[in-house]
Amino acid sequence: MISSTYNKFLLGISCVLTLGACQPLPEETAEASTDKVYSIEEAFEIVAKENDIARTLYTKAIVGAGKKKGLKFDEDWEKDHVEAGPLPALFLRGIAGDIRKKGEVPLGLFLGSDFPIRKSNKFKGKQAELFAEMRNDSVPKFFFDEENQLYTAMFPDFAAATPCVSCHNDHPETTKTDWKMGDIQGATTWTYPKDSVSFKELKEIIMAYRGGATATFNEYIAKTKSFKENEIPNVGELWPTAGYQIPSSEVFIDSVAILTSEETLEGILQL
């Protein structure tokens, strides 16, 4: 279920969420924002920033800190015999799958690379060409996919945490073993069938992403309840830094919302 903390932000766009503070916006500013039409490039930039913050929080505060406390994460985490949570790339895949499965918003999400662990994630054609450019300039790429009739955006996916580097370097099927912090490991690709969106559609895009993050985190929590060989972690208000435990999905998503909402709102108003 979507947390009311950021649901109020999106539905009303009447305040800036900070750590416990909510400041009203001028009425005319809020009304102007809801009437505006955004280019799909602008919408992609907003949701891509949400994704960057959510994945970084998951990678560092859940996976990185969790491993130090004994929590396990595995690429086969969904298999019945594997007692682990999803790695960061699979957390994103879970979000993408939830958006696709619900089908409420025609937003596509894909994480690819020129050195992927799974061959199916290797960029081809136009995306491969643009990603080669991205390796040189680190700049997002926007284009129209003629074959699928979709507006597309590619954003560089940087190695922002130690687990990203070590996992890819040590994986038995890796094709590159010298990744370093700050390297562009791949690109997050977004697709949408229209060249512009209303405020309502932009809100739906953001909500679809956050809904996918909530659903995927809930799947992780549900998986821990089935552990038999490993201790079942406590779920509640505390994070792995405090012990063998994980926050509830509400705590995790509220933290994502607090980190992203002010920046997202500022981005919407500036556009």
Image: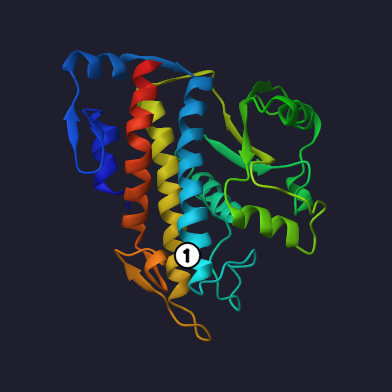
Q: Residues within 10 Å of mark 1 (few under 14, many from 20)?
A: some
| Nearest the eye: 255 or 166 | 166
Where is 169 relative to 155, above or below?
below
Where is 152 relative to 231, above or below?
above
- Residue 216 position within the rendered picture, expressed as x and y whole percent measured from the top left: 47, 56
Residue sitting at x 59%, y 68%: 77
Quadrant location, the C terminus: top left
- Residue 94 position within the rendered picture, expressed as x and y whole percent measured from the top left: 54, 53
- Residue 22 position within the rendered picture, expressed as x and y whole percent measured from the top left: 18, 35
Q: Is residue 218 visible?
A: yes
Q: Is residue 105 visible?
A: no
Residue 51 shown left or right of residue 253 in the figure: right
Residue sitting at x 67%, y 58%: 166
Residue sitting at x 54%, y 45%: 100
Where is 164 relative to 70, above or below?
above
Q: Residue furthest front?
A: 181
In the picture of the structure, the residue carrying the numbered disc 1 is 220
Please count the marks in the image: 1
Residue sitting at x 43%, y 34%: 205
Amino acid under label 1?
A: Tyr
Element marked by disc 1: helix
